[in-house]
């Protein structure tokens, strides 16, 4: 598929949610050993979250395009906030006023939490701002989507920079710094995952998402035994700590999916310790089924510089295609990622995931706001904040 196509690029192998399961290879060979779904799990999830890529005829279905009036309002909010002489991490609607754009952002927040589960804001030109002001724009706009911001690692980094880095073998193999494609996954914590695209690659690097609800519906109809497997509390996750828990939960009439292949199988950057238990044949088959169905129902989004993506991390899987950077700085892919939660619209978090959410959003500790990528061993050479 062309990297210059406009609008959503839909996977070629789209199939109806019920019917010919041959289009989902890993979902075939249904067993009669498990005739029904786990207790409490529905036969079908009938919500706006259960979509396939073919449901979106135009990128305008999920992209909020900012107009000149919106941009003027954003620029005025930046100047107003700077006049208050506050630290940048204190950006919130009260000190970043968007009187007209606010209503559009609140609708988008509702869509992310209760509608289709994702959205893109387009129209920001990164080259029009200093890196400090661009970060204020990002934080200010996202505060209307979900106001709580979470740590993303043990060091307390609030901003994670996703850039290619081949300075060491380990960084070159890490999915955050590799140029290779990666498989579908969720982040370990955060109701909403957002990222600002500062620059795109010379080729490739599209954002690709899929609905966990659509995946569930296919498996519930064709392989209910896999729903049992995914809901069992015996999956040996190794990151961010070793823990047995399910991959899927059904609570408060909502499906929650949370997993990553690296934390279950290991990879070159994070080899799995030999003393840890391996996945069973049924578990590996279930992971492959998720990937197969996700790819058959995925939505590809051709990202532009300045785009802000917001993804419901509890209901939507995401991955990235491989990419090639160019020679100029504007042709080197650079995303800035954050983890978010809304006090008003946030979902109830299963007990098995609560510790990761607490460490991200409620744990008191250091918060680092590096506006540019830093070496992993970086620390500020000072004992006072200023």
Image: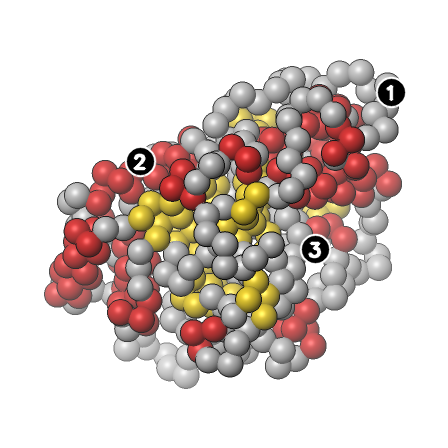
Res 123 label: none
Q: Is residue 322 left or right of residue 142?
A: right
Q: CB of mark 1 within 8 Å of CB of mark 2?
A: no
Q: Earlier in the sequence, mark 2 or mark 3?
A: 2
- Label 3 neighbour load within 10 Å: few <14, some 14-19, many 20+: some
Answer yes or no: is residue 143 visible: no
Vertical placement of residue 145 versus 214, above or below:
below
Q: CA distance from mark 2 to mark 3?
A: 35 Å
**Nearer the camera: disc 2 or disc 3:** 2
- Label 1 neighbour load within 10 Å: few <14, some 14-19, many 20+: few
Q: CA distance from mark 1 to mark 2?
A: 45 Å
Question: What residue sits right under mark 3 in the picture?
Answer: 262
Residue depicted at x 43% and y 68%: 199
Residue depicted at x 59% and y 27%: 250
Q: Position of residue 40 (x, y in %)?
A: 63, 18
Query: Which structural element holds mark 3?
Result: helix
Out of 383 and 37, give the one closest to the viewer: 37
Answer yes or no: is residue 179 visible: yes
Q: Quadrant of the N terminus?
A: bottom right
Q: Is residue 251 left or right of residue 184?
A: left
Question: What residue sits right under mark 2 in the picture?
Answer: 107
Res 33 label: 1
Q: Position of residue 219 (x, y in %)?
A: 71, 28
Query: Which structural element holds mark 2?
Result: helix
């Amino acid at each position: 598929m062309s990297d210059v196509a406009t609008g959503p690029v839909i996977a070629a192998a789209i199939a109806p949610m019920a019917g010919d399961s041959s289009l989902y290879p890993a979902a075939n060979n249904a067993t009669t050993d498990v005739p029904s779904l786990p207790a409490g799990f529905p036969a079908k999830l009938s919500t706006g979250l259960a979509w396939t890529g073919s449901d979106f005829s135009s990128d305008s279905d999920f992209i909020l395009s900012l107009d000149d009036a919106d941009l003027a309002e954003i620029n005025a909010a930046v100047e107003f906030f700077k006049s208050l002489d506050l630290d940048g991490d204190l950006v919130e609607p009260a000190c970043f006023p968007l009187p007209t754009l606010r209503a559009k952002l609140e609708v988008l927040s509702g869509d992310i939490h209760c509608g289709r589960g994702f959205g893109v804001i387009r129209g920001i030109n990164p080259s029009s701002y200093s890196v400090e002001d661009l970060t204020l724009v990002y934080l200010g706009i996202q505060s209307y989507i979900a106001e709580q911001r979470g740590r993303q690692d043990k060091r307390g980094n609030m901003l994670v920079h996703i850039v290619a880095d081949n300075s060491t073998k380990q960084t070159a193999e890490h999915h955050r710094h590799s140029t290779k494609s990666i498989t579908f996954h969720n982040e370990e914590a955060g109701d909403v995952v957002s990222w600002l695209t500062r620059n795109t690659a010379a080729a490739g690097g599209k954002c690709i998402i899929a609905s966990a609800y659509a995946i569930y519906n296919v498996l519930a109809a064709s392989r209910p035994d896999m729903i049992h497997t995914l809901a069992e509390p015996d999956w040996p996750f190794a990151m961010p700590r070793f823990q047995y828990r399910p991959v899927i939960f059904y609570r408060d009439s909502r499906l929650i999916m949370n997993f990553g292949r690296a934390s279950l199988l290991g990879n070159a950057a994070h080899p799995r310790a030999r003393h840890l238990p391996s996945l069973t044949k049924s578990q590996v088959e279930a992971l492959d089924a998720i990937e197969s169905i996700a790819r058959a129902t995925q939505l590809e989004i051709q990202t532009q510089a300045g785009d802000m993506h917001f993804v419901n991390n509890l209901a939507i899987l995401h991955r990235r295609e491989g990419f090639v950077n160019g020679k100029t700085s504007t042709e080197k892919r650079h995303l800035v990622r954050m983890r978010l939660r809304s006090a008003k619209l946030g979902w109830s978090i299963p007990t098995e995931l609560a510790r990761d959410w607490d460490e991200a959003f409620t744990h008191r500790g250091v918060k680092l706001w590096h506006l540019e990528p830093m070496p992993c061993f970086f620390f500020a050479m000072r004992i006072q904040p200023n």
